[in-house]
Amino acid sequence: MTVLKLHRKIYRGTAVDAALKVYGSYATFEQREEPDHWVVSVSATTPARERRVAGELANYALGLTIAARNASPE
Amino acid sequence: MANPFAELPKDLVTLDAESVSLRLDATLYPLSAVYSAAYIFMDRAYLLLDQPDAEHLKVTLSWKKAPAQASGALERLAGEFANELLSCAWRARIAEDSRLVIESTTARALGGAMGPPSLDDLESFDFGDQPFEDPLGIALSWEEKYGKKKKDDKEPGP
């Protein structure tokens, strides 16, 4: 299992949710919240697939965060 | 190949088997600059951003596909990212410093693009208003300022 910890001040929650929807069919995800992080546990059939899905998910969430931030900076 | 980061402080760059992490001073590299640099690298690397404490940001990078020349690939990735980040931070600084000039120029350009005032605008314009104070009489015409005075203006005699 690969655990992704995405900092709340860096990644928007809506972006993480959208990324989870996009990659939902490629692996199994478990979500939980910590005071500073969105925590996503990724489980897939092989470690290589797990690493790839986790990386793509993090990139997608980051990309959406940047796009949303450019559209409406906080 | 010698480690190019060997002479840097150990907590600044951390090399693992598949990834490399950079610890950044948030005052030198604002989050907006880190976002910009990260966006540029998204097509070839996986990136994970974190904020270990209020003064620092952490960027972890790993190749999406291992490059043909595997030796020193992670060091190369970290070096390229650091250079791009420096460029983005500098551009962010320039943009911040020249923001007022850009806003003022844009406002003037947009104002000019609106064209001359229409007849309706002129009709509703209040010409009676004093647009500015003129204690030195700069806005007066030559005749008003130095021309012969009318007889009515003569001071009454003794």
Image: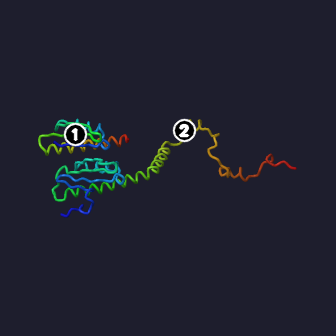
Whole-percent x and y of residue B17? Answer: 17, 53
Q: Residue at x 21, y 51 (%)?
A: B62
Tag 2, which chain?
B
Q: Which mark is residue A4?
A: none
Q: Residue at x 16, y 38 (%)?
A: A27
Number of numbered labels in the structure image: 2
Whole-percent x and y of residue B2? Answer: 20, 64
Quadrant position of the N terminus of chain A in the picture: top left
B60 relative position to B25: left or right: left
B80 relative position to B144: left or right: left
| Residue A14 vertical placement versus B76 (above, below) | above
Residue marked by disc 2: B118
Residue type marked 2:
Ser
Q: CA distance from mark 2 to mark 1?
A: 61 Å
Q: Secondary structure at mark 2?
A: loop
Q: Which mark is residue A40?
A: 1
Tag 1, which chain?
A
Whole-percent x and y of residue A68? Answer: 33, 40
Q: Nearer the viewer, residue A68 or A51?
A: A51
Q: Secondary structure at mark 1?
A: strand
Label 2 neighbour load within 10 Å: few <14, some 14-19, many 20+: few
Quadrant position of the C terminus of chain A in the picture: top left
Residue type marked 1:
Val
B5 relative position to B88: left or right: left
Q: Nearer the viewer, mark 2 or mark 1?
A: 1
| Residue A15 vertical placement versus B22 (above, below) | above
Q: Are marks 2 and 1 on the same chain?
A: no
Q: Residue at x 41, y 51 (%)?
A: B96
